[in-house]
Amino acid sequence: MKLKKAVAMGIGAVLVTGMMLTGCGSKTEVPDSTGTQESTGTDSSGKLQIEIVAKGFQHDFWQAVLKGTEKAAEELNVTTNFVGPEGEGAIAAQVEQLNNAINKGPDAICLAALDTSAAIDSISNAQSKGIPIIGFDSGVPGAPEGAVPANAATDNYKAGELAAEKMYEAIKDKVTDPANTVRIGIVAQEANSESITQRTAGFAEKMSSLIGEDKSSVEGHDKYNRKVEGAKVIIEVRIPTEVTDNAGKTEALTLLNKADLIGIYGSNEFAAKCIINANEGMNKLGADKVIAVGFDSGALQIDAVKSGVFYGSVTQDPVSIGYNAVKLAVAASKGETVADVDTGCQWYNAENIDSEEIASCLYE
């Protein structure tokens, strides 16, 4: 059964005028408020207070998201506070940060949930206090009805499909009725957050569809397994037991050491870095070698794309994600009707990486 992206929440939600984005450079406008809901968390200057709880803080991606939240805060004249755990495996730490945010009584909260099930009680608490939560990045799938009226995020399933389509262009001849078994590897950071699972599922299912579902077998992890006996194309999913550089690198090395590997995909910045680091000294990636496709950016991945070590990558627009999350939070805090914003994605490679359209979506 295919994983589906989260359905937009909120009965009667309609698309806010001007909120749909068509590319990484687009920005969203929120109309002037006509709501009468009173502020619950204004600071001493009378500004609205928006608390932001991310999945992390140190990675380049989250620093770019932070820049977007700061841009929106300045434009809208609101106060924001951005926090996140040290690592994206620290679920309990994030829940504690969410609870701290709720206890401040802000006007709204932006949340990129590491694990919604672990945060259900906290989310319900925020809802009982009348604090709207806006999802961003992976959103908050499975939250109580009405607690999360909108999300600002990439359509991660479609983004995963895009990565598969681009890789397929490069390996088509090798996966069309091969005489011997060939393997496509996937390194996924973890199997909890909606963004990572959707990118992984989108890639695996699209690649399987392009090759032929009766000719490809998805293996390696129970969440994605779709085994087909006798299939000559194996799509193998590897997920580290913990979100650490060494654990991720080990999974990437396991794939790179397989003689039948023809392609490898990393479903976020962490996974792409693990693949690049695992390849150091092996020299197995590149044109006429193993085709590597990544996700997000960062200095290491950008260099791999420019040098041809990576065939290309899919980028989100992290600045736009942060920017639109705060825009939605402000609107929701004023009682306005809000709806999901697709913040878009783009494919970049050595040929277009320096273009204005792509450069605005990358971060180092």
Image (spheres, rainbow, N blue to C red):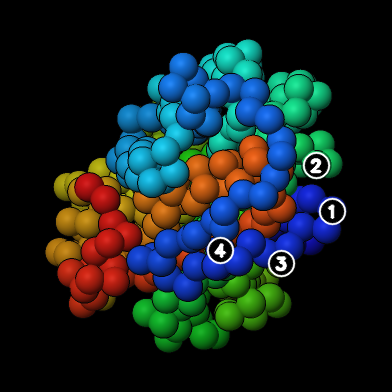
Q: Residues within 10 Å of mark 2 (few under 14, many from 20)?
A: some
Q: Secondary structure at mark 3?
A: loop
**Residue 135 coordinates in the image, percent (x, y):** 61, 43
Q: Give the labeled residue for mark 3.
A: 229
Q: Amino acid at mark 2?
A: Gly
Alpha carbons under labels 2 and 3: distance apart: 44 Å
Alpha carbons under labels 4 and 2: distance apart: 20 Å
Q: Amino acid at mark 4?
A: Met
Q: Are marks 4 and 3 in contact (CB under 8 Å)?
A: no
Alpha carbons under labels 1 and 4: distance apart: 18 Å
Horizontal side of residue 275 vs 87, given as left or right: left
Is residue 165 in sight in this rendering?
yes
Alpha carbons under labels 3 and 1: distance apart: 45 Å
Q: Residues within 10 Å of mark 4 (few under 14, many from 20)?
A: many
Along the line of sight, the residue nearer the viewer: 219 or 47: 47
Along the line of sight, the residue nearer the viewer: 274 or 290: 274
Q: Give the labeled residue for mark 2.
A: 146
Q: Nearer the viewer, mark 4 or mark 2?
A: 4
Residue at the spot 60% in from the left edge and 72% down from the top edge: 206
Q: Secondary structure at mark 1?
A: loop
Horizontal side of residue 343 vs 204, given as left or right: left
**Residue 222 coordinates in the image, percent (x, y):** 70, 46
Q: Are marks 2 and 3 in contact (CB under 8 Å)?
A: no
Q: Are marks 2 and 1 in contact (CB under 8 Å)?
A: yes
Q: Give the labeled residue for mark 4.
A: 19
Q: Quadrant of residue 230?
A: bottom right
Q: Quadrant of residue 19?
A: bottom right
First in sequence: mark 2 vs mark 3: 2
Along the line of sight, the residue nearer the viewer: 192 or 10: 10
Is residue 84 in sight in this rendering?
no
Along the line of sight, the residue nearer the viewer: 163 or 83: 83
Q: Nearer the viewer, mark 2 or mark 3?
A: 2
